[in-house]
Image (cartoon, rainbow, N blue to C red):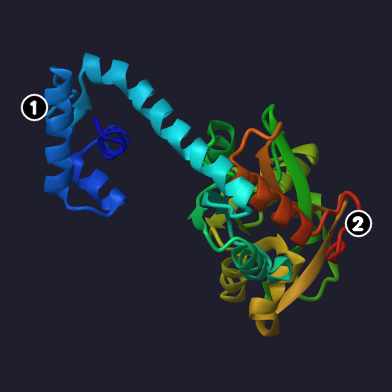
């Protein structure tokens, strides 16, 4: 029995097929199939049911899988411990995120970590905030950057890195273009342009409107803040977006302060508490927290306008 066979077993089980597992492992599919068959011969039992469209674990496969994962984790742990003694950090870290303001300089943060730890592989994943939080809780992600709206689940820590005013923007020919501000109750019935549900900005908008006694009428949604401004610039409605995102179409937009109440959008980096990460992940989290602002303590970048 070889570690390679155990790695292939885990990959096929998680990917639900030999072809996807081979792509993930960057090897040829026949090689994966051959190694799994060899492992099945050694164990004397089939590990996968290949009769359907999707490859499924047999009862024996289900029972064996946790031991395969434990063996691979033990070997990885041995390598990490040895590397710590030599001062060389190895491994893989996964960061999830959404579109971030340029003031955060994420490329600079990632480049700085890679320079210090060139043997650590960094993967980036984009998804919605709900999926990102789930990835942190389940351990699929080591660090995530997301908009803050709903309360965080237990076991998750956060560092606020963006805290900025939300504004309303309209096309310069819009009937509201002569005003300097708009009160939240005045948004009632207007076609609004917003980020999707489950984002921090949308949560702030819905909370403010709810307190004013109505649900916002969101006519258009977009996943990127700058797109909201572009839609407003085409006369499609009133966009609610972070003040820093106005610049993308500023020449065509009129900006209104939102009052009664004012609204703010926050973003944070989140991670699992308690140090339940690999040495590489712990180093990455520490590096990110040093590089990115900490608005709870007045970090290096400070609060945005």
The image quadrant of residue 182 is bottom right
Image: 143 above or below 73: below
Which residue is disc 1 drawn over?
Answer: 51
Closer to the camera in the image, 188 or 278: 278
Alpha carbons under labels 2 and 1: distance apart: 59 Å
- Label placed on residue 298: 2
Q: Give the x, y percent position of residue 82.
A: 55, 44
Name of the residue lying farthest toward the bottom: 251
- Label placed on residue 247: none
Q: Give the x, y percent position of residue 138.
A: 53, 32
- Earlier residue among tags 2 and 1: 1
Q: Residue at x 85, y 71 (%)?
A: 180
Name of the residue lying farthest toward the right: 298
Q: Residue at x 60, y 65 (%)?
A: 228
Image: 258 above or below 272: below
The local secondary structure at tag 2 comes to loop
Horizontal arrangement in the rendering, residue 280 relative to residue 53 (left or right): right
Closer to the camera in the image, 215 or 56: 56
Crowd class of label 2 (few under 14; some 14 to 19; many from 20; radius 10 Å): few
Crowd class of label 1 (few under 14; some 14 to 19; many from 20; radius 10 Å): few
Q: Give the x, y percent position of residue 285.
A: 68, 49
Q: Give the x, y percent position of residue 112.
A: 66, 67
**How many numbered discs sit on the rendered protein?**
2
Q: Quadrant of the C terminus?
A: bottom right
Q: Are marks 2 and 1 in contact (CB under 8 Å)?
A: no
Residue 154 is at least partly visible in this image: yes
Q: Quadrant of the N terminus?
A: top left
Horizontal arrangement in the rendering, residue 21 relative to residue 79 (left or right): left
The local secondary structure at tag 1 comes to loop
Closer to the camera in the image, 235 or 128: 128
Q: Residue at x 27, y 55 (%)?
A: 26
């Amino acid at each position: 029995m070889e570690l390679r066979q155990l790695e292939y077993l885990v990959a096929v089980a998680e990917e639900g097929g030999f072809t996807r597992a081979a792509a993930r492992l960057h090897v040829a599919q026949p090689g994966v199939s051959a190694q799994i068959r060899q492992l099945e011969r050694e164990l004397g039992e089939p590990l996968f049911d290949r009769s359907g469209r999707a490859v499924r674990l047999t009862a024996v496969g289900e029972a064996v899988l946790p031991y395969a994962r434990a063996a691979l984790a033990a070997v990885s742990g041995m390598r990490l411990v040895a590397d710590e003694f030599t001062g060389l950090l190895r491994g893989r870290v996964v960061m999830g995120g959404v579109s971030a303001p340029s003031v955060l300089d994420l490329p600079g943060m990632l480049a700085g970590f890679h320079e210090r730890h060139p043997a650590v592989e960094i993967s980036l994943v984009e998804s919605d905030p709900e999926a990102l939080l789930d990835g942190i809780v389940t351990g699929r992600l080591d660090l995530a950057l997301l908009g803050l709206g709903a309360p965080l689940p237990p076991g998750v820590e956060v560092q606020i890195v963006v805290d900025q005013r939300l504004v309303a923007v309209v096309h310069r020919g819009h009937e509201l273009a002569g005003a300097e501000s708009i009160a939240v109750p005045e948004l009632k019935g207007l076609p609004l342009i917003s980020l999707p549900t489950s984002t921090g900005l949308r949560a702030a908008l819905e909370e403010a409107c709810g307190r004013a006694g109505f649900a916002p009428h969101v006519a258009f949604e977009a996943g990127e803040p700058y797109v909201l401004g572009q839609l407003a610039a085409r006369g499609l409605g009133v966009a609610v977006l972070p003040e820093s995102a106005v610049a993308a179409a500023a020449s065509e937009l009129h900006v209104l302060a939102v009052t009664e109440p004012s609204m703010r959008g926050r973003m944070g980096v989140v991670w699992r508490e308690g140090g339940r990460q690999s040495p590489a992940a712990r180093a990455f989290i520490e590096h990110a927290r040093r590089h990115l602002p900490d608005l709870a303590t007045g970090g290096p970048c400070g609060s945005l306008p």
